[in-house]
Image: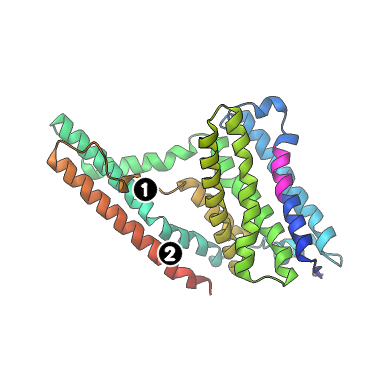
Amino acid sequence: MTCNHAEYSLPTCCIWAVILSSSFVLNLYLLVPHSITKLQRSDERQIKWRIFSVTCTFTAAISIYPFFFCKSNIFYGDLLHDILGISYFDRSSLLPLLHVMILYSGSFMTAILRYNLVYTSKFQCSKRKLDSSRYRYIINQCKHGINMPFSNFWESCRNFFVAPLAEEIIFRSCMITPFVYNKQMSIAQICWLVPLFFGVSHAHHAWTKLKNGAPLKVVLFSTLFQLMYTTLFGAYASFCFLKTKSLFAVVIAHSFCNFLGLPDFSLLIPSSNGFADEQMARVVKNSRIISALVYSIGIYFFYKRFDIYE
């Protein structure tokens, strides 16, 4: 039995989106004890309670979705597969991941260049041969960089599994689908409108920062930057979801982006101090050029390879 999806008006879809995004944020405070919310975000107890909260939120969203948007009875297997995009893993589920990896090629190269700079700096300062070769040092640092985000089990569980899964179910599967069946908006319009709810839902971090004593200007700047970044990412994730019709595809890409974090552009900024050693200055200059080149190539091919979703 399949779902005869109801076609609600655009204002109704927006109200549904507001309810989902508000519930996602409010439950982090309503379902989490007040004594726990005062703890650091990296505290294990805080993480466990937040995992519990978002799990309750996306479970409730999936459970009540058919009662609002399905005209006829529906098996939850049909709902998960046909409406919410929760299907079996296949090759198309890797498309967004591969596409995002192209964009992050500059970050990969920048990390390697930074490790090379550290090795060169140590060699220049010590004036002696280091214990390991340059390539072995870089490889070991890369391994350390990969393993470090997984050093805390509950933190990595939240960042790379629960948070991506919960956010994609709520802000992609449950939120986008009514707009699609509304048939009043194009894919491009949906991709730019719906992520605004995703971006605004992250603004509650500003309140936490203010309570912790952060300056107002710093909080405003960081909040606006986070709003812009999450909205852009939400637009891209929405596009991937609509094109692949696969929740797993966007969850995998989301986890990968959480793992790498924001791109590191600091190497592109010239240092005001300069370097006394000419060889070190030359290495830094060459690293800056290579980093800028790879970032440019990655952005170009990321833009050109949107055709993989056709």
Q: Splitting the image into 4 quarters, where does residue 168 fall?
A: bottom right
**Magenta run includes residue 297:** no
Q: CA distance from mark 2 to mark 1?
A: 17 Å
Q: Amino acid at mark 1?
A: Phe
**Magenta run includes residue 23:** yes
Q: What residue is at 48 percent from the left and 73 percent from the top?
A: 307
Could you tell whether 24 is left or right of 75 in the image?
left
Could you tell whether 279 is left or right of 309 in the image?
left
Q: What residue is at 37 percent from the left and 56 percent from the top?
A: 105
Q: Which residue is mark 2?
A: 302
Q: What residue is at 64 percent from the left and 40 percent from the top?
A: 204
Q: Specify the principal SS of the magenta part.
A: helix
Image quarter where the N terminus lies is bottom right
Q: Is residue 85 visible?
A: yes
Question: How far from the left and from the top, in percent, is residue 208?
Answer: 61, 33
Where are the magenta residues, as a range? 21-28
Could you tell whether 139 is left or right of 252 in the image?
left
Q: What residue is at 56 percent from the left and 31 percent from the top?
A: 42
| Depth order, front residue of 14/151 | 14
Q: Are marks 2 and 1 in contact (CB under 8 Å)?
A: no
Q: Which residue is mark 1?
A: 265
Total residue callouts: 2
229 relative to 128, above or below:
below
Q: Most extreme residue toward the right, as rendered?
A: 72
Which comes before the other along the chain, label 2 or label 1? Answer: 1
| Depth order, front residue of 9/5 | 9
Give the SS element for disc 1. loop
Q: Could you classify mark 2 by the number of other residues whose Cα lies within 10 Å: few (under 14), some (14-19), or many (20 or more)?
A: some
